[in-house]
Image: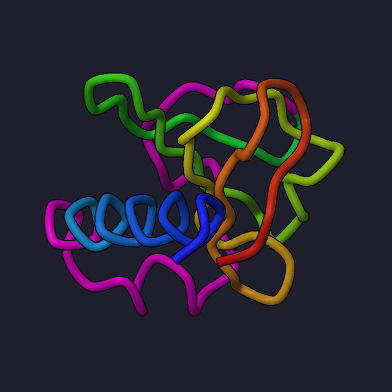
Amino acid sequence: MNEENEKIDILNKKLEELITEFGDFRYITNRKLNFKDRTGDTVETNFMRIGKFGTVTLFISDGTTPDGNLTGVVGDICLNGAGGLAYYCDTAGKNWTAM
């Protein structure tokens, strides 16, 4: 297994743990997000920080891709990105990859 796949496996495991913590993943991703209905910090247009777990920050999007639009650090996760996909930040800055 190469280093990239190992990182993806680790991030997928973290995401599974976070989903368990937050409940039903479908509820989070299969509806249009209305920021007025949520608590959290709006950090950039279209994105809200909904939790921090150690060094991993969990964001939720209104359906906008975080790639190029959301600043994060390696390991951060963004739910409900483009196409309803989850994304992970693979380098510090605005570089995000769909899971």
Q: How many marks?
A: 0
Q: Position of residue 31 (x, y in %)?
A: 52, 74
Quarter of the rendering containing residue 62: bottom right
Identify the coloring. rainbow
Magenta-tinted stretch? 19-44
Q: Who is closer to the viewer here, 40 or 15?
A: 15
Q: Is residue 94 above or below residue 59?
A: above
Q: Is residue 69 above or below residue 63?
A: above
- Residue 16 is covered by the magenta coloring: no
Q: Position of residue 78 (x, y in %)?
A: 53, 47
In which quadrant is the C terminus drawn?
bottom right
In which quadrant is the N terminus drawn?
bottom left
Q: Residue at x 59, y 68 (%)?
A: 32
Q: Who is closer to the viewer here, 95 or 2?
A: 2
Q: Who is closer to the viewer here, 88 or 62?
A: 88
Q: Position of residue 27 (x, y in %)?
A: 34, 74
Q: Residue at x 46, y 58 (%)?
A: 8
Q: Is residue 91 above or below residue 23?
A: above
Residue lying furthest front in this view?
Answer: 1
Q: Residue at x 56, y 54 (%)?
A: 4
Q: Residue at x 55, y 43 (%)?
A: 35
Residue lying furthest right in this view?
Answer: 68
- Residue 32 is covered by the magenta coloring: yes
